[in-house]
Image: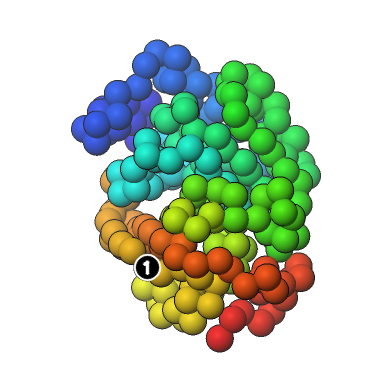
Amino acid sequence: MNEQQFIEALKEKGIELTQVQIDQFKKYFELLVEWNEKMNLTAITDLEGVYLKHFYDSISASFYFDFSKVTTVCDVGAGAGFPSLPIKICFPHLHVTIVDSLNKRINFLNHLSEQLNLDHVEFVHARAEEFGQNQKYREKFDVTTARAVARLSVLSELCIPLVKKGGYFVALKAAAGPEELKDAKKAIATLGASLNQEFAYLLPVEESERTIYIFDKIKETPKKFPRKPGVPNKSPIQ
Ligand SMILES: C[S@@+](CC[C@H](N)C(=O)[O-])C[C@H]1O[C@@H](n2cnc3c(N)ncnc32)[C@H](O)[C@@H]1O
Protein backbone atom coordinates (compact mmCIF):
# COMPACT_ATOMS: atom_id res chain seq x y z
CA MET A 1 0.00 0.00 0.00
CA ASN A 2 1.69 3.21 -1.10
CA GLU A 3 1.03 6.61 0.42
CA GLN A 4 -1.71 7.55 -2.04
CA GLN A 5 -3.51 4.21 -1.59
CA PHE A 6 -3.26 4.69 2.18
CA ILE A 7 -4.81 8.17 1.97
CA GLU A 8 -7.63 6.86 -0.24
CA ALA A 9 -8.27 3.75 1.86
CA LEU A 10 -8.67 5.92 4.96
CA LYS A 11 -10.93 8.34 3.10
CA GLU A 12 -13.21 5.44 2.20
CA LYS A 13 -13.49 4.72 5.91
CA GLY A 14 -14.40 8.33 6.66
CA ILE A 15 -10.93 9.53 7.76
CA GLU A 16 -9.78 12.46 5.62
CA LEU A 17 -6.17 13.24 6.37
CA THR A 18 -4.95 16.84 6.31
CA GLN A 19 -1.56 17.71 4.78
CA VAL A 20 -0.13 17.96 8.31
CA GLN A 21 -1.22 14.40 9.08
CA ILE A 22 0.06 13.10 5.72
CA ASP A 23 3.43 14.70 6.50
CA GLN A 24 3.41 13.20 10.00
CA PHE A 25 3.05 9.69 8.53
CA LYS A 26 5.80 10.42 6.00
CA LYS A 27 8.17 11.56 8.77
CA TYR A 28 7.15 8.59 10.95
CA PHE A 29 8.18 6.23 8.12
CA GLU A 30 11.50 8.02 7.59
CA LEU A 31 12.42 7.99 11.28
CA LEU A 32 11.41 4.35 11.65
CA VAL A 33 13.76 3.38 8.82
CA GLU A 34 16.56 5.66 10.06
CA TRP A 35 16.46 4.42 13.67
CA ASN A 36 15.98 0.84 12.58
CA GLU A 37 19.52 0.95 11.18
CA LYS A 38 20.84 1.52 14.72
CA MET A 39 18.38 -0.62 16.68
CA ASN A 40 15.84 -3.33 16.07
CA LEU A 41 12.46 -1.58 15.99
CA THR A 42 10.66 -3.56 13.31
CA ALA A 43 11.24 -6.26 10.71
CA ILE A 44 9.10 -4.30 8.24
CA THR A 45 11.01 -1.41 6.68
CA ASP A 46 9.76 -1.08 3.09
CA LEU A 47 7.38 1.82 2.49
CA GLU A 48 4.46 -0.30 1.29
CA GLY A 49 4.86 -2.71 4.19
CA VAL A 50 5.03 0.03 6.82
CA TYR A 51 1.98 1.88 5.46
CA LEU A 52 -0.06 -1.33 5.31
CA LYS A 53 1.10 -3.49 8.22
CA HIS A 54 1.94 -0.77 10.72
CA PHE A 55 -0.02 2.40 9.87
CA TYR A 56 -3.20 1.05 8.24
CA ASP A 57 -3.34 -2.05 10.45
CA SER A 58 -3.10 0.12 13.59
CA ILE A 59 -5.74 2.60 12.41
CA SER A 60 -8.11 -0.23 11.45
CA ALA A 61 -9.00 -0.53 15.15
CA SER A 62 -10.73 2.84 14.78
CA PHE A 63 -13.06 1.44 12.09
CA TYR A 64 -14.62 -0.72 14.82
CA PHE A 65 -14.07 1.30 17.97
CA ASP A 66 -15.00 5.00 17.98
CA PHE A 67 -11.96 6.81 19.39
CA SER A 68 -13.71 10.16 19.09
CA LYS A 69 -15.84 9.23 22.15
CA VAL A 70 -12.83 8.74 24.46
CA THR A 71 -9.85 10.82 25.63
CA THR A 72 -7.23 8.74 27.43
CA VAL A 73 -5.61 5.73 25.76
CA CYS A 74 -2.90 3.46 27.13
CA ASP A 75 -0.94 1.27 24.70
CA VAL A 76 0.79 -1.65 26.39
CA GLY A 77 3.99 -2.85 24.68
CA ALA A 78 3.71 -0.42 21.77
CA GLY A 79 7.29 -0.97 20.57
CA ALA A 80 7.77 1.60 17.81
CA GLY A 81 4.32 3.09 18.59
CA PHE A 82 1.76 0.59 17.29
CA PRO A 83 -1.17 0.77 17.34
CA SER A 84 -1.58 3.98 19.36
CA LEU A 85 0.53 6.55 17.48
CA PRO A 86 -1.07 6.13 14.03
CA ILE A 87 -4.42 6.36 15.84
CA LYS A 88 -3.23 9.50 17.67
CA ILE A 89 -2.20 11.11 14.36
CA CYS A 90 -5.72 10.49 13.00
CA PHE A 91 -7.47 11.49 16.27
CA PRO A 92 -5.28 14.34 17.59
CA HIS A 93 -7.51 15.03 20.62
CA LEU A 94 -6.37 11.76 22.26
CA HIS A 95 -4.06 11.68 25.27
CA VAL A 96 -1.82 8.66 24.73
CA THR A 97 0.33 6.87 27.27
CA ILE A 98 2.66 4.15 26.07
CA VAL A 99 4.31 1.68 28.42
CA ASP A 100 7.11 -0.53 27.15
CA SER A 101 9.77 -2.53 28.94
CA LEU A 102 12.50 -1.76 26.38
CA ASN A 103 14.13 1.62 27.00
CA LYS A 104 15.60 1.99 23.51
CA ARG A 105 12.06 1.94 22.12
CA ILE A 106 11.05 4.65 24.60
CA ASN A 107 13.99 6.77 23.38
CA PHE A 108 12.78 6.37 19.81
CA LEU A 109 9.22 7.34 20.79
CA ASN A 110 10.41 10.49 22.57
CA HIS A 111 12.39 11.57 19.52
CA LEU A 112 9.54 10.65 17.16
CA SER A 113 6.92 12.61 19.10
CA GLU A 114 9.16 15.69 19.13
CA GLN A 115 9.74 15.48 15.38
CA LEU A 116 6.03 14.92 14.69
CA ASN A 117 4.96 17.65 17.14
CA LEU A 118 2.65 15.31 19.00
CA ASP A 119 1.13 16.74 22.16
CA HIS A 120 -0.47 14.86 25.07
CA VAL A 121 1.75 11.82 24.72
CA GLU A 122 3.65 10.14 27.55
CA PHE A 123 6.15 7.30 27.23
CA VAL A 124 6.93 5.19 30.26
CA HIS A 125 9.72 2.68 30.57
CA ALA A 126 8.24 -0.06 32.76
CA ARG A 127 6.90 -3.57 32.86
CA ALA A 128 3.14 -3.50 32.42
CA GLU A 129 2.82 -5.74 35.50
CA GLU A 130 4.34 -2.97 37.69
CA PHE A 131 2.74 -0.10 35.81
CA GLY A 132 -0.68 -1.66 36.49
CA GLN A 133 0.01 -1.57 40.24
CA ASN A 134 1.05 2.10 40.12
CA GLN A 135 -1.86 4.13 41.54
CA LYS A 136 -1.09 6.98 39.13
CA TYR A 137 -2.07 4.73 36.22
CA ARG A 138 -4.19 1.89 37.61
CA GLU A 139 -7.83 2.07 36.46
CA LYS A 140 -7.23 5.55 35.00
CA PHE A 141 -7.65 5.06 31.24
CA ASP A 142 -10.75 5.25 29.05
CA VAL A 143 -9.15 2.66 26.76
CA THR A 144 -6.24 0.26 26.92
CA THR A 145 -5.04 -1.29 23.70
CA ALA A 146 -2.26 -3.59 22.49
CA ARG A 147 -1.04 -5.40 19.41
CA ALA A 148 1.38 -8.34 19.17
CA VAL A 149 2.45 -8.39 22.82
CA ALA A 150 1.11 -11.63 24.34
CA ARG A 151 -1.70 -14.14 23.98
CA LEU A 152 -5.04 -12.85 25.20
CA SER A 153 -5.06 -14.72 28.54
CA VAL A 154 -1.77 -13.01 29.44
CA LEU A 155 -2.47 -9.69 27.73
CA SER A 156 -5.73 -9.30 29.66
CA GLU A 157 -3.81 -9.25 32.94
CA LEU A 158 -1.46 -6.56 31.57
CA CYS A 159 -4.21 -4.38 30.10
CA ILE A 160 -7.52 -4.71 31.99
CA PRO A 161 -6.20 -3.39 35.38
CA LEU A 162 -5.36 -0.09 33.66
CA VAL A 163 -8.88 0.52 32.35
CA LYS A 164 -11.26 2.61 34.45
CA LYS A 165 -14.69 1.18 35.26
CA GLY A 166 -16.92 1.98 32.28
CA GLY A 167 -13.91 2.00 29.92
CA TYR A 168 -12.72 -0.45 27.28
CA PHE A 169 -9.95 -2.89 26.45
CA VAL A 170 -9.44 -3.00 22.66
CA ALA A 171 -7.28 -5.97 21.60
CA LEU A 172 -5.88 -6.23 18.06
CA LYS A 173 -5.40 -9.87 17.14
CA ALA A 174 -4.43 -11.92 14.09
CA ALA A 175 -5.72 -15.32 12.96
CA ALA A 176 -5.25 -16.99 16.38
CA GLY A 177 -7.72 -14.55 18.02
CA PRO A 178 -10.71 -16.93 18.41
CA GLU A 179 -8.54 -19.67 19.91
CA GLU A 180 -6.92 -17.17 22.31
CA LEU A 181 -10.33 -15.86 23.33
CA LYS A 182 -11.45 -19.34 24.41
CA ASP A 183 -8.40 -19.66 26.68
CA ALA A 184 -8.83 -16.14 28.06
CA LYS A 185 -12.50 -16.28 29.13
CA LYS A 186 -11.74 -16.98 32.80
CA ALA A 187 -9.02 -14.31 32.96
CA ILE A 188 -11.22 -11.63 31.40
CA ALA A 189 -14.08 -12.28 33.88
CA THR A 190 -11.69 -12.48 36.87
CA LEU A 191 -10.10 -9.14 35.92
CA GLY A 192 -13.50 -7.40 35.75
CA ALA A 193 -14.20 -7.22 32.01
CA SER A 194 -16.73 -8.66 29.61
CA LEU A 195 -16.68 -9.10 25.82
CA ASN A 196 -18.81 -6.43 24.16
CA GLN A 197 -18.09 -6.89 20.44
CA GLU A 198 -15.74 -8.69 18.10
CA PHE A 199 -15.02 -7.92 14.45
CA ALA A 200 -13.25 -10.26 12.05
CA TYR A 201 -11.89 -8.76 8.84
CA LEU A 202 -9.11 -9.07 6.30
CA LEU A 203 -6.24 -6.64 6.02
CA PRO A 204 -6.37 -5.25 2.46
CA VAL A 205 -3.78 -6.23 -0.18
CA GLU A 206 -2.38 -9.33 1.50
CA GLU A 207 -5.73 -10.40 3.02
CA SER A 208 -4.39 -11.70 6.31
CA GLU A 209 -6.94 -12.33 9.04
CA ARG A 210 -7.52 -9.85 11.82
CA THR A 211 -9.89 -9.77 14.78
CA ILE A 212 -10.60 -6.79 16.99
CA TYR A 213 -12.04 -7.54 20.42
CA ILE A 214 -13.74 -4.82 22.44
CA PHE A 215 -14.16 -5.60 26.13
CA ASP A 216 -16.13 -3.50 28.64
CA LYS A 217 -14.63 -2.91 32.07
CA ILE A 218 -17.62 -3.69 34.23
CA LYS A 219 -16.09 -3.91 37.70
CA GLU A 220 -12.88 -3.12 39.57
CA THR A 221 -9.93 -5.45 39.05
CA PRO A 222 -9.02 -7.36 42.25
CA LYS A 223 -5.95 -5.74 43.85
CA LYS A 224 -3.69 -8.75 43.39
CA PHE A 225 -3.70 -8.29 39.57
CA PRO A 226 -1.48 -7.75 37.71
CA ARG A 227 0.83 -10.15 39.50
CA LYS A 228 4.63 -9.73 39.55
CA PRO A 229 6.58 -9.40 36.27
CA GLY A 230 6.68 -12.68 34.39
CA VAL A 231 3.96 -14.39 36.45
CA PRO A 232 1.06 -13.67 34.03
CA ASN A 233 3.06 -15.27 31.23
CA LYS A 234 4.22 -18.24 33.29
CA SER A 235 0.87 -18.95 34.94
CA PRO A 236 -2.01 -17.30 33.05
CA ILE A 237 -5.24 -17.01 35.05
CA GLN A 238 -7.15 -20.28 34.50
C1 LIG B 1 6.45 -7.76 19.27
S1 LIG B 1 6.59 -6.16 19.94
C2 LIG B 1 5.10 -5.43 19.34
C3 LIG B 1 5.20 -3.94 19.27
C4 LIG B 1 3.95 -3.22 18.78
N1 LIG B 1 2.82 -3.38 19.68
C5 LIG B 1 3.58 -3.65 17.38
O1 LIG B 1 2.48 -4.17 17.20
O2 LIG B 1 4.38 -3.45 16.46
C6 LIG B 1 6.20 -6.40 21.68
C7 LIG B 1 6.54 -5.20 22.55
O3 LIG B 1 5.98 -5.41 23.83
C8 LIG B 1 6.93 -5.04 24.82
N2 LIG B 1 6.59 -5.83 26.01
C9 LIG B 1 6.52 -7.19 26.10
N3 LIG B 1 6.14 -7.56 27.34
C10 LIG B 1 5.98 -6.41 28.06
C11 LIG B 1 5.60 -6.12 29.41
N4 LIG B 1 5.34 -7.11 30.28
N5 LIG B 1 5.53 -4.84 29.79
C12 LIG B 1 5.82 -3.83 28.92
N6 LIG B 1 6.18 -4.04 27.64
C13 LIG B 1 6.26 -5.31 27.21
C14 LIG B 1 8.29 -5.35 24.19
O4 LIG B 1 9.33 -4.58 24.76
C15 LIG B 1 8.03 -4.98 22.72
O5 LIG B 1 8.34 -3.63 22.47
In the rendered structure, the answer to whether residue 145 lies left or right of residue 236 reads: left
**Which residue is nearer to you in this view: 91 or 216?**
216
In the rendered structure, the answer to whether residue 109 lies left or right of residue 4 reads: right
Q: Amino acid at mark 1?
A: Leu
Residue 218 place in picture, x, y as percent:
44, 65
Image quarter (top left, top right, bottom left or bottom right) of the N terminus: top left
- Residue drawn at x 30%, y 29% is 15
Residue 190 place in picture, x, y as percent:
53, 77
> Is residue 30 shown above or below 187?
above
Residue 116 place in picture, x, y as percent:
58, 21
User: Which class describes the residues within 10 Å of circle 1: few (<14), some (14-19), or many (20+)?
Assistant: some
Q: Which residue is mark 1?
A: 195
- Residue drawn at x 53%, y 43% is 73
Q: Quadrant of residue 182?
A: bottom left
Q: Quadrant of residue 180?
A: bottom left
* Direction bottom: furthest residue: 238
**Label 1 CB less than 8 angstroms from ligand 1:** no
Q: Secondary structure at mark 1?
A: strand
Ligand 1 falls in quadrant: bottom right
